[in-house]
Image: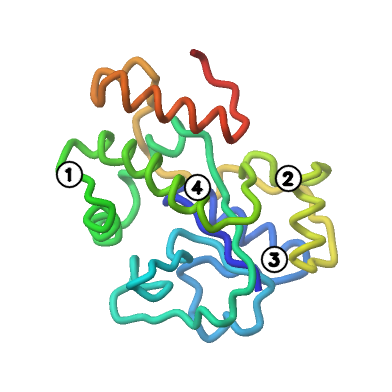
Amino acid sequence: MIAIATVPRSGSRYTSLYGFLSGGMVCHEKTPMGRFGRANGLVGYLFVEWPDQPMGTIGREQQLFPSWLVTRRWQQVRHPLRCIASIPTAQRSAMRRMYTRLGIPAAVPIAQAAMLWLEWNQFIETFSEWTYRVEDLRPGTDVADRFRIEMDLPEEPLEIPRDMNTRPHEPLTWEWLQALVGKRLVRDIKELGRHYGYEIEP
């Protein structure tokens, strides 16, 4: 089974629906665990495994994920500005545990989200064999073809709405982000975004 790790608010519900409409089952992190054994894959921010902490415990305390089911790991990323702007809308208890785990200090929510986007993605990349952009997971792309083939999904779905899990939040610009977190962090985020293939201004 393939586990796809993400930063929160990186399109995991969209990916789960994509798997379903492709004739398979790609379980979102909030899917009841009883279904995992029948799944083609898993997607969400829970599906990481620290050396001293079992997979699945970052977001849901007392819930141990059967990590022996996972044989391969991928990384799904989302454009930094769009993801960072949306992270503060995620479940607060899970965010607090992730911030604590990474040593992210208390700060305004957008500043914490910026540090999380950078550091969680950097961590995920260390154990992932493939990184793809969620924006490229749509019918007719090379990313979608590889996703379906390696997930063993039988069908190519029709176009899927991108706004299926949109949550209200303020738009974010690089200028506003820099005013909140400083030039150095913005520079590092931009560099990682370009590494993932996003066209980002210098």
- Residue 43 as seen in the image, left or right of residue 140: left
SS at mark 3 in the image: helix
Q: Earlier in the sequence, mark 1 or mark 4?
A: 4
Q: Amino acid at mark 2?
A: Arg
**Residue matched to label 1:** 105
Q: Quadrant of residue 15?
A: bottom right
Label at residue 10: 4
Image coordinates of residue 2 in percent, x first then y, are: 64, 68
- Which of 143 and 70 lies nearest the eye of the viewer? 70
Residues at circles 1 and 2 in contact by the CB criterion of under 8 Å: no
Badge 3 amino acid: Phe
Q: Which mark is residue 20?
A: 3
Label 1 sits on a secondary structure element that is loop
Task: Kindly report the distance in space between the C-alpha atoms of the residues bearing marks 2 and 3.
Answer: 13 Å
Query: Where 27 falls versus 141 (above or below)?
Result: below
Residue at 64% x, 67% y is 72
Crowd around label 4: few <14 · some 14–19 · many ≥20 (10 Å): many
**Disc 3 from disc 4: Cα separation:** 18 Å
Q: Position of residue 153 (x, y in %)?
A: 79, 66
